[in-house]
Image (cartoon, rainbow, N blue to C red):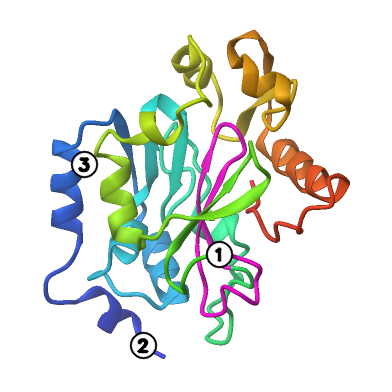
Amino acid sequence: MRGLTELVNVDEPAWPLLQEAFTSGAAALEVVPGDAEQGRACLLQLQVSARSALGALALHTGGVIVDGGWLRVFGGASGASAAGLPSLAQVNHFPSDFDPAWRPTDGLVVGHDVLGGVFALNGHDAAGAGRPGAPGQMVYFAPDSMEWEALEMGYGTWLTWLVSGRLEQFYEGLRWPGWQDEASRLTSDQGISVFPFLWSKEAHADLAATSRRPVPMAELLGLNRDFCAQMGLPAPGFLGSV
C-alpha cells in the first residue's frame, strides 16, 4: 500500500499534460472544479499516483463534461460546482473510510453518456468479470447492442481521444438532429430514454423518428440490465451508481 504523500508528490505529474490536451482539443468540454480533500481521498483509495491520467483527474477535478453534456467523465470530487457530477467514489461505491483491501468488483466505472452507455476501466480479471479486452484497458457498454465492447486503449489515451473530436464518429448512428439541445437541458443525474429502444430495428432504421424523453440515469441503467436478462444476453455487471 502506498501512502498519500507518495501518490501526490510525484515527478512528471500528468495534470499539466491533461490541461494542455483539454485546452487544445477539438471537443467542447467543461472541466468541473475539484475539491482537494475529496480528490486526495479518492487518490488514496484508487492507489494510483498523480503521474497517471486517472490519478491526475481524480486529484484535480470534479470530472469533465464533454460535448455539452452528452458524456460525463467522473472525477475525484462531487458537488464542487453547479454541474453537480457524482464522484468516482459515489459512482463506484468506495468505502466510506480508506480500505486497502477494497477493489471494484467488475472494473472501475469512469463515465456515462446520455444514452446509458457506460465507460469502464477493466480490473485485473477482466475475463472473470465477463468483460472483453485486457486488464487495465477501457471498455464500453453499448446501449444499442446491450454488450460490452473493448476499446483497446488505456485510460490516458481514452481521455485524449475523447477531447480530440472523434466522438462524432464513435456515435455515428446514435445521434439525431437536435441532440445537442436535448443533451444540454439534462441535469447531471439524467439520461435520454429512446423509444423504440436503441437496439430495436426501428431505431436502427430511423433514429430521428424515435420519441425521446429525459429520465433518471439510474432508471436508464436499470432498464439496460433488464433488457439483457429479457434477451438472454450476458448480465452486464456493475454499471455505476448515480
**Above or below — where is 143 with respect to 14?**
above
**In the rendered structure, which amino acid carries the disc numbered 2?**
Arg
Q: Residue at x 18, y 77 (%)?
A: 10
Which residue is more in the foreground, 220 or 2? 220
**In the rendered structure, which amino acid carries the disc numbered 1?**
Pro
Foreground: disc 3 or disc 2: 3
Q: Quadrant of residue 65?
A: top left
Instruction: Return the x and y of residue 105 as percentages of the image width and height.
Output: 64, 73
Q: First in sequence: mark 1 or mark 3? A: 3
Which residue is more in the foreground, 208 or 218? 208
Q: Is residue 125 magenta?
A: yes
**Label 2 crowd (10 A; few <14 / some 14-19 / many >=20):** few
Taking the image as shown, residue 66 lies to the left or right of residue 106, namely left
Q: CA distance from mark 1 to mark 3?
A: 29 Å
Instruction: Return the x and y of residue 175 as percentages of the image width and height.
Output: 50, 22
Q: Is residue 138 magenta?
A: no
Which residue is more in the foreground, 134 or 14? 134
Q: Residue at x 20, y 58 (%)?
A: 15
- SS at mark 2 in the image: loop
Q: First in sequence: mark 3 or mark 2? A: 2
Q: Residue at x 63, y 24 (%)?
A: 204
Label 1 belongs to which residue?
A: 132
Label 3 belongs to which residue?
A: 22
Give yes or no for contact between labels 2 and 1 (Cβ–Cβ under 8 Å): no
Label 2 belongs to which residue?
A: 2
**Magenta segment, which residues?**
107-131
